[in-house]
Structures are given as C-alpha cells and as structure tokens.
Image (spheres, grey):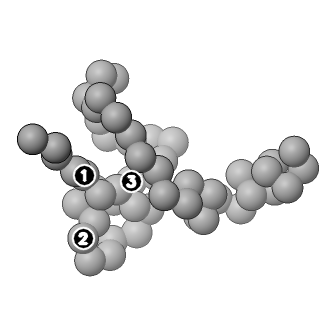
Amino acid sequence: MTLTINVDIQLFKGVEVVADANLLPFPPGSFQKIFSHNPFDYSVSRLNEVQII
C-alpha cells in the first residue's frame, strides 16, 4: 500500500500538511520515497541560485 501525503506552503484543495519545506513536521526515516513536483516554485532565493548555476 502506498501512502501519499500532499505538502504545500499554502492550504489548497488536496493539501494535507501546510509547512515550509525547510521545516517539515516529520521525523527522520518517516518516508521510503519522496517525490517533489516543482520544488523551486515558491522559493525566490532558490530560483536565483539555480539561475546562477
């Protein structure tokens, strides 16, 4: 069985956990796999870092 937890910085339909990606409320070892869709969408500083690279 696969358990999916939708996390976002803002509450939208389908989001179960609202949290900053730098401060996720899960203890280490909570997940076997992580999938991130558009991880740079909400971080202007990270977008700038990617542009510099």
Quarter occupied by residue 11: bottom left
- What amino acid type is highlighted by mark number 3? Ala
Tell me which numbered mark, 1 or 2, is placed earlier along the sequence.
Answer: 1
Specify the farthest residue to the front: 1
- What amino acid type is highlighted by mark number 1? Ile
Query: Real-space Cα distance between discs 2 and 3?
Result: 14 Å
| Mark 3 Cα-neighbour bin, 10 Å: few <14, some 14–19, many ≥20 | some
Q: Is residue 38 above or below residue 24?
A: below
Looking at the image, residue 19 sits to the left or right of residue 43; the answer is left
The residue to which callout 2 is attached is 14
Name the mark nearer the viewer: 3 or 1.
1
Kindly check if marks 3 and 1 are in contact, taking CB atoms under 8 A apart as contact. no
Mark linked to residue 19: 3
Query: Real-space Cα distance between discs 1 and 2?
Result: 9 Å
Q: Residue at x 47, y 50 (%)?
A: 36
Specify the farthest residue to the left: 1
| Pick the front one: 2 or 52 | 2
| Mark 1 Cα-neighbour bin, 10 Å: few <14, some 14–19, many ≥20 | few
- Residue 39 appears in the rendering: yes
Total marks in image:
3
Looking at the image, residue 13 sits to the left or right of residue 38; the answer is left
The residue to which callout 1 is attached is 5
User: Residue 45 in the image: x percent, y percent?
Assistant: 74, 55
Tell me which numbered mark, 3 or 1, is placed earlier along the sequence.
Answer: 1
Specify the farthest residue to the right: 52
Q: Secondary structure at mark 2?
A: loop
Query: Real-space Cα distance between discs 3 and 1?
Result: 12 Å
User: Residue 28 in the image: x percent, y percent?
Assistant: 33, 23
